[in-house]
Image (cartoon, helix red, strand yellow):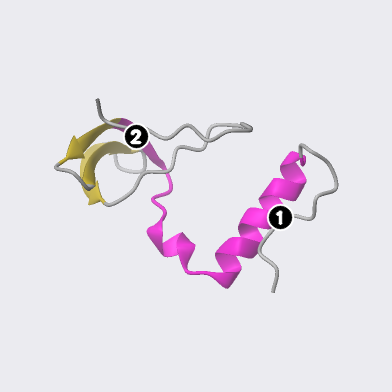
């Protein structure tokens, strides 16, 4: 029931990351929270605890908006997470 990648190296390859994500998704209900084939065009704060996400649904070519409580931006390997704080 482990949901983490075995630490074989400091930087796991694409296959290991893909296997981890598939395993995690199978053991949680995270897939129901993911919008596939959507290209995010903007993220705007809404109040103190929410975000409005605008995205292009590339399957039908229509822009859609979602209001969410949290945003995860996953773009690569970083040792220290960068957390947005409003100034």
Mark 2 Cα-neighbour bin, 10 Å: few <14, some 14–19, many ≥20: some
Q: What's the residue at 63%, 59% (across, down)?
A: 22
What residue is disc 1 on? 19
The image shows residue 74, relative to residue 22, as above or below, that is above
Q: Residue furthest left?
A: 47
Relative image position of residue 20 (x, y in whole percent): 68, 56
Q: Quadrant of the C terminus?
A: top left
| Front in this rendered view, residue 36 or 6 | 6
Q: What's the residue at 59%, 68% (across, down)?
A: 26
Which is nearer the N-term, disc 2 or disc 1? 1
Q: What's the residue at 29%, 37% (across, down)?
A: 55
Residue 34 is one of the magenta-drawn residues: yes
What residue is disc 2 on? 40
Is residue 23 rendered to the left or right of residue 85? right
Relative image position of residue 10 (x, y in whole percent): 79, 38
Is residue 13 rendered to the left or right of residue 23? right
Q: Which residues are magenta?
A: 12-41
């Amino acid at each position: 029931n482990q949901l983490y990648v075995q630490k074989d190296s400091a930087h796991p390859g694409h296959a290991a990351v893909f296997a981890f994500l598939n395993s995690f998704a199978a053991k949680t209900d995270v897939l129901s929270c993911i919008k596939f084939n959507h290209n995010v065009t903007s993220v705007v704060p809404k109040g103190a605890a929410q975000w409005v996400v605008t995205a292009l649904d590339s399957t039908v070519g229509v822009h859609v908006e979602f209001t969410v409580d949290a945003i995860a931006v996953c773009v690569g390997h970083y040792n220290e997470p960068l957390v947005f704080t409003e100034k």
